[in-house]
Image: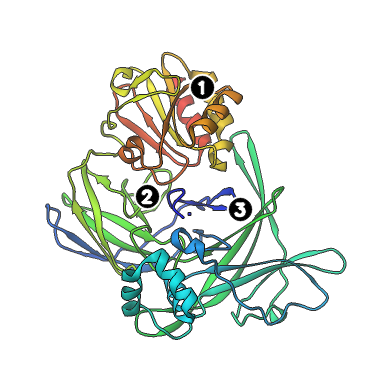
Amino acid sequence: MTREKPRMLFTQVKNIIICLLLAGVTCFVPGSVSGDDNDSAIRIELREINTDSMGVLQEYASASGEGSRFPPQEDIKEYPRNYTVKETFWINLQKYQYLYNLARSDRKNNDRVIKVLGQEWFDDARLKYTGQPVDCIVSVCVVESPEGGEYIIFDADNDENFSNDRLLTFRSEELQRGNIKIISQLAESDVEIEFYDGSEVRTRTIRISIVRNIGNRIYTGYAHCSMMTGELPLDGKLFTVGLIESQDIEYRQSSNLWIDTNQNRMFDPDEDYYAQVNQPFTVLGRTYQVVETDRFGNHITIRKVDLPSLEVGLPAPDFKAVTMDSTGFNLAENKGKYILLDFWGTWCAPCVNEIPVLKEAYDRYGGKKFEIVSIGVDDEKKLYSFIHKNNLKWTHIRQDQNGDLVKLYRIDHYPTKYLIDPQGILAAKLGLNSDELLEKLDRIFH
């Protein structure tokens, strides 16, 4: 996003932040590992499993990061007759193959791509990608019938012709987030895409879903892809890991890593470790870093690093900071009460949606036993205005995207919350479920 925000479980579409809500729990089967659990590098071999219950978010109109300057588009041969086309958008499932083909298409595009990604990237892409066309883009359109009915069409056979595809309707989905009710509409279809696997162009069927939020009419697309899994051996225990790519058929350091830290042989977003591959992670009190990710997710390599631990059940990383009212906050001096660290921003719609739940939690329990410390990754003026307009009475700290606290707590998904107990121990890491926060606090204080 040109790098405005970190790559997370949500994406910015027409300046609206729409969050991917993971659906339930995903079971898995293990792969294998080579190496050992000492300070040497550990290579974890991975195998593919299907994850139909897990949405993997895709921007509907552009690739993320550098690719956002080169939005994918296809020439549509035909739309259904007698229907009014309201919107057409595209989902790119192999970004770098698409950019490599774009760079080879003509001199102007070659100069544009190299200017953004660099000559070194292009020289490396020559070794990884094919010069022949690869149709890795899926087209989707929304149309209106003469009677006023609205339909969505997926180019399921990927022939750039909507006239031979099914007319589908949206089904309503309702989600309660604390006091906020989110209503959206969903449509799904299996589609065929082409991708280059390093030796040949292959075809793969992937289920694509389009979510439309009621009110702002924003369409967000995501693909149901696979997960690569394997096992990490530490101290005689096996921790299953999962590798997920959220915006591409290829895997890289910006993909997501899931670790079954509670060893219940399930991936649960509320209990297990989940973050970008490039983030250090802590297991059994030791911190590791993924140092190499296979392009198609066949293996990852990790190595132990000398960084503070960040794991539920261990002491929370200590810090001092200046608050937005120019006073100081010292985490160590606040032992004896529960502290909720809330990483958020006014640009993050799910963060804003959860403000009423945080206010309710503070009204119920704020004081000597409980304190909220919100770390706003945002523009100072916007943050200050929002805090005062909404009468947010708890402690506030502002950070840049690469601020010390963002790095210390390895934040790459927003909102992210850490609950710290009166002894300074990380009691829980909370993602999107603020209802869970109220339930935890109710159990603690009753």
| Lateral position of residue 93 relative to residue 213, left or right | left
Point 41% across, 16% down: residue: 369
- Please, what secondary structure does the residue beneath circle 2 have? strand
Q: Residues within 10 Å of mark 2 (few under 14, many from 20)?
A: many
* Residue 408 point in image, percent of width and height: 30, 38
- Please, what secondary structure does the residue beneath circle 1 have? helix
> Residue 319: which quarter of the image?
top left
The answer to whether any part of residue 117 appears in the image is yes
- Do the numbered discs 3 and 2 sit on residues whose CB atoms are within 8 Å? no
Gap between marks 3 and 1, in whole Å?
Answer: 33 Å
Nearer the N terminus, badge 1 or badge 2?
2
Q: Residues within 10 Å of mark 3 (few under 14, many from 20)?
A: few
Q: Which of 351 and 337 lies nearest the eye of the viewer? A: 351
- Please, what secondary structure does the residue beneath circle 3 have? loop
Q: Amino acid at mark 3?
A: Lys
Residue that badge 1 annotates: 362
| Lateral position of residue 126 relative to residue 291, left or right | right
Point 37% across, 57% down: residue: 254
Q: Amino acid at mark 1?
A: Tyr
Q: Is residue 8 above or below residue 104?
A: above
In this rendering, the label closer to the viewer, 3 or 2? 3
The tag on residue 275 is: 2
Q: Amino acid at mark 2?
A: Ala
* Residue 154 point in image, percent of width and height: 64, 72
Q: Is residue 285 above or below residue 373?
A: below
> Residue 83: which quarter of the image?
bottom right
Residue that badge 3 annotates: 14
* Residue 225 point in image, percent of width and height: 47, 66
Nearer the N terminus, badge 3 or badge 2?
3
Point 43% across, 84% down: residue: 201
* Residue 413 point in image, percent of width and height: 43, 46
- Do the numbered discs 3 and 1 sit on residues whose CB atoms are within 8 Å? no
